[in-house]
Amino acid sequence: MSSGEINYEKVGFVDEIDEKYRLKDGDILFTNINSLKWIGNVVYFEDKKTLYHGMNLMLLRPKKEFNPKYIFYYISFHNAWFKKMACQAVNQASINKSTLEKFSLLIPNLEIQNQIVDLLTNIDKKIFLSRENIKIMKLYKNSLLQKMFV
């Protein structure tokens, strides 16, 4: 979750788990117990894989009248608030439900939410493509260097 995405290589496995922990499309996972650096990190689940949420994560499932991806983007943007409000211990920090209830969400009507989500999603796609192009260009550069200097 540290990169804003679910890393399936680091997902644990159990034999049996209650179905209430199964993620649904549009669920948001919120890191509420971890080192302070990771508190408030969120991941938006829109995968077709079967996945269950576990410890140190809070499941946020917005009501149907809200665009869940809007809520995800809003929480992501206000990440610093959660870090500021977290209770810190020696190596752990946490944010509890009563503190979370103090967080104010500015929620426009659904049409505006959808427009904001469409815009930000398109930007995310462009960022992803740019990162992929950079990877390809680095490989190409290394290939040229290898041909020139070997």
Image (cartoon, helix red, strand yellow):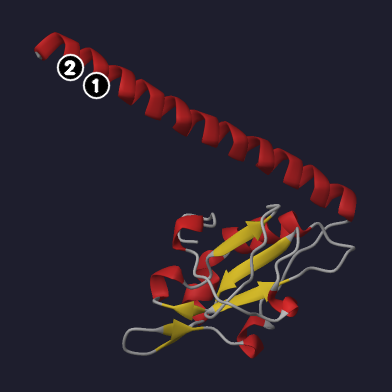
Position of residue 61 measured from the top left corner of the image (x, y, whole percent): 76, 70
Q: Is residue 142 left or right of residue 57?
A: left
The image shows residue 26, relative to residue 88, as above or below, that is above
Q: Is residue 5 left or right of residue 141?
A: right
Would you identify the image quadrant in which residue 35 lies? bottom left
Would you identify the image quadrant in which residue 90 lies? bottom left
Q: Residues within 10 Å of mark 1 (few under 14, many from 20)?
A: few
- Residue furthest front as drawn: 15
Q: Residue at x 88, y 54 (%)?
A: 110
Q: Residue at x 45, y 57 (%)?
A: 9
Return the residue nearer the eye: 24 or 121. Answer: 24
Mark 1 in CB contact with mark 2 (< 8 angstroms): yes
Position of residue 100 measured from the top left corner of the image (x, y, whole percent): 64, 81
Q: Amino acid at mark 1?
A: Asn
The image shows residue 129, relative to residue 53, as above or below, that is above
Q: Residues within 10 Å of mark 2 (few under 14, many from 20)?
A: few
- Residue furthest top as drawn: 148
The answer for how far apart the CA atoms under marks 1 and 2 are is: 6 Å
Question: Looking at the rendered structure, which numbered label has been put on residue 146?
Answer: 2
* Secondary element at tag 2: helix
Position of residue 109 measured from the top left corner of the image (x, y, whole percent): 88, 56
* Secondary element at tag 1: helix
Say which quadrant the C terminus sits in: top left
Q: Amino acid at mark 2?
A: Gln
Q: Residue at label 1?
A: 142
